[in-house]
């Protein structure tokens, strides 16, 4: 059967329940951008439709894919739109829109000039310290005024921000961001006479900073079973949703002193048994994953031996009993956390999950 990604939708729903319990007073956008972090956006959204309060994606095409697939739940477009026609398409699809820069407000004015006078919910994004998207705190109330005067009747105008370092302990960035955001909410309330609906918490914010959850949370990586912080935990109750596995296609006897793979970077320190697995960088494994990185077999873990090739890897199974052609091996997932493999690769779990190639079949269970 070769390589495949098994997606456990029961684990996905269980992870959502963990997040729901962590923020019982909040509604939740399940983040399914980047093809649900490599898990399949439409399948994930169908599994959580009616369970989550809505979904969040980065780009218009991702939202349209969900709508075309029958998802009628609220969908938040995290990057907003960058062209007038895209704004019209987003309104036609009934999307919640993020507005994070003045040009997007101008699009609403032009839309009103074309005779469109109603729009869905708009989330005004505040840059409280990420320095990526959003209005600076001193510009937020003016942006609010411009949106309210743009000629389009908004169903609601809300506030959001995004954490930069909520997954890191011992830094004062998150409390500082929360304080800046709280001051904006207070000023908004004083101006309008009512408190705005707010969205703050990502996965780390939801699980590690109860004060940073807000009316709506936006969990991403934790939905897929990855703890949001290696240093602070927060992963209790989470289960891996993706298990990437493959099969042994050959077993080789390699004498002491001989090398394995391109470049001869791994040399046998003893007479060794090497299993060749059908998986490589064309499937999404990082080419720079070093020798020694673990692969899980039924009998235990064994180390990668040599460079990752396009379609194959070699694993030193000398210390495991009876590894044979056809046996399955887990590259990450059940029994081998993806964050462990990411640590060996010098990257983060997000990148590995998102990089699983389209040629890898997804098998949905649960």
Image: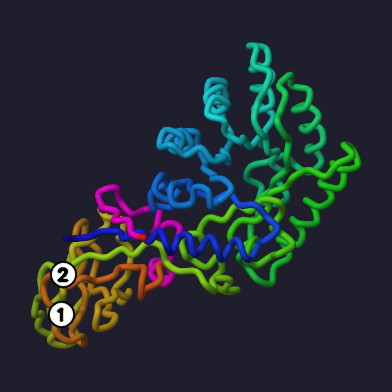
Picture coordinates of residue 225, whole percent (x, y): 47, 65
- Circle number at residue 52: none
Query: In the rendered image, which residue does mark 1 sit on?
Result: 323
> Residue 4: percent from the left, percent from the top?
25, 59
| Marks 2 and 1, how far apart at CA | 8 Å
Q: Quadrant of residue 114?
A: top right
Q: Position of residue 102 (x, y in %)?
A: 69, 29
Q: Is residue 211 left or right of residue 261?
A: right
For label 1, the crowd category at 10 Å Cα-Cα, with few meaning under 14, some 14 to 19 and many 20 or more, is many
> Which residue occupies 67% across, 22% down?
118
Marks 2/1 in contact by CB < 8 Å: the verdict is yes
Drawn side of residue 231 relative to residue 181, left or right: left
- Residue 192 against residue 33 in the figure, above or below: above
Label 1: which secondary element: loop
User: Residue 348, can we see it?
Assistant: no
- Residue in the image at 68% along x and 18% along y: 117
Residue sitting at x 43%, y 37%: 70
> Which one is nearer the viewer's eye here, 190 or 26?
26
Residue range highlighted in magenta: 339-365
Residue 178, relative to residue 253: is it above or below?
A: above
Q: Secondary structure at mark 2?
A: strand
Whether 361 is among the magenta residues is yes
Q: Which mark is residue 248?
A: 2
**Residue 90 among magenta residues:** no
């Amino acid at each position: 059967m070769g390589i495949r990604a098994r997606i456990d939708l029961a684990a996905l729903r269980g992870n959502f329940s963990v997040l729901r319990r962590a923020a019982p007073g909040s509604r939740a956008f399940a983040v399914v951008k980047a093809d649900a972090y490599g898990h399949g956006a439409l399948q994930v959204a169908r599994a959580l439709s009616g369970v989550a309060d809505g979904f969040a994606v980065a780009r218009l095409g991702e939202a349209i894919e969900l709508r075309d697939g029958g998802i009628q739940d609220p969908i938040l477009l995290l990057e907003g739109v960058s062209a007038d026609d895209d704004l019209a398409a987003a309104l036609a699809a009934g999307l919640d829109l993020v507005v994070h820069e003045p040009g997007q407000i101008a699009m609403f004015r032009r839309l009103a000039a074309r005779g469109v006078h109603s729009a869905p919910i708009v989330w005004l994004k505040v840059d409280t310290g990420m320095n990526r998207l959003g209005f600076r705190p001193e510009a937020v109330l003016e942006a609010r005024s411009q949106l309210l005067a743009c000629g389009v009747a908004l169903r609601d105008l809300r506030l959001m921000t995004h954490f930069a370092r909520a997954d890191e302990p011992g830094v004062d960035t998150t409390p500082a961001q929360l304080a800046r955001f709280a001051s904006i909410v207070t000023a908004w309330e004083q101006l309008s006479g009512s408190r705005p609906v707010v969205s703050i918490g990502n996965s780390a914010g939801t699980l590690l900073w109860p004060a940073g959850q807000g009316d709506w949370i936006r969990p991403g990586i934790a939905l897929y079973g990855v703890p949001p912080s290696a240093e602070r935990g927060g992963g209790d109750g989470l289960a891996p949703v993706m298990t990437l596995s493959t099969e042994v296609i050959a077993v080789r006897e390699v004498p002491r002193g001989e090398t394995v793979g391109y470049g001869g970077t791994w040399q046998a320190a003893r007479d060794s048994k090497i299993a060749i697995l059908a998986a490589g960088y064309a499937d999404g494994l990082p080419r720079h994953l070093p020798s020694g990185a673990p692969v899980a077999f039924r009998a235990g873990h064994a180390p990668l031996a040599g460079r990752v090739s396009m379609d194959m890897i070699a694993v030193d199974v000398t210390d495991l009993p009876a590894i044979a052609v056809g046996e399955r091996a887990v590259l990450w997932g059940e029994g081998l956390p993806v964050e462990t493999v990411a640590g060996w690769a010098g990257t983060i779990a997000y990148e590995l999950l998102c990089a699983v190639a389209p040629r890898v079949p997804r098998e949905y269970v649960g």
